[in-house]
Image (spheres, rainbow, N blue to C red):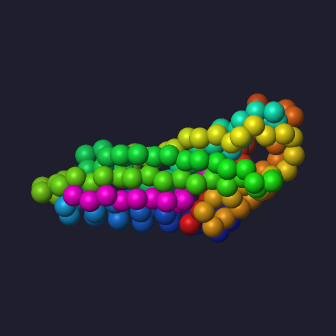
Amino acid sequence: MYDETMTYSIALRFVLPLLLLTAACNGSSDTVLDDVGLACAEGIADAALPVTVDFQSCLSSSCDHLQSAECTVTLDGTTLTVEATATIHHPDNPTNTCTADCGSAFAECETPILAEGTYTLVYGDQSTELVVPTDAPADAEPTCVEAR
């Protein structure tokens, strides 16, 4: 399934790395990513569902250091709201030599225990429907929402 979200995701994967590498090579600084990227949840009823947030960043191993990455999920009625933040430190790099490798920044958290049903998964400025089944096939895809 290819839609405008995928187009945005592809653009983000190319633009953000350039911004991060530029910041990393021009003095010490921190970049804070709040509620951006892709939040995915999967699981079955009567359990806490794991949620993974991919900040969709590209970190140079020689110039970027993930200082922290965390997320939380709150339940209000049938709405699950994911909030996530990551801080990336870019130390001074007087030689302006940053490797072009592309490491990722992830945060993991979990929902409260959920009963079978349909929920709204909210992340940043986006939302999608999350169906929590009593059982799920082993090859079930996670439900994801991408914040911009």
Determine the image quadrant of residue 133: top right
**Looking at the image, which is closer to me, 54 or 107?**
107
Could one spot residue 10 in this view of the protein? yes
Residue 54 appears left or right of 140: left
Residue 10 appears left or right of 128: left
Give the image location of residue 61, x and y in percent. Answer: 30, 44
Q: Residue at x 19, y 61 (%)?
A: 27
Q: Residue at x 39, y 53 (%)?
A: 87
- Residue extending farthest to the left is 94
Q: Eyeballing the image, is 117 above or below 128?
A: above
**Image quadrant in which the C terminus is located:** bottom right
- Image label count: 0
119 in magenta: no
- Magenta residues, as a range? 28-39
**Looking at the image, which is closer to me, 24 or 117?**
117
Residue 29 appears left or right of 104: left
Q: Residue at x 84, y 39 (%)?
A: 115
Could one spot residue 100 in this view of the protein? no
* Magenta portion: prevailing SS class: strand
Residue 68 appears left or right of 93: right
35 in magenta: yes
Q: Residue at x 87, y 34 (%)?
A: 134
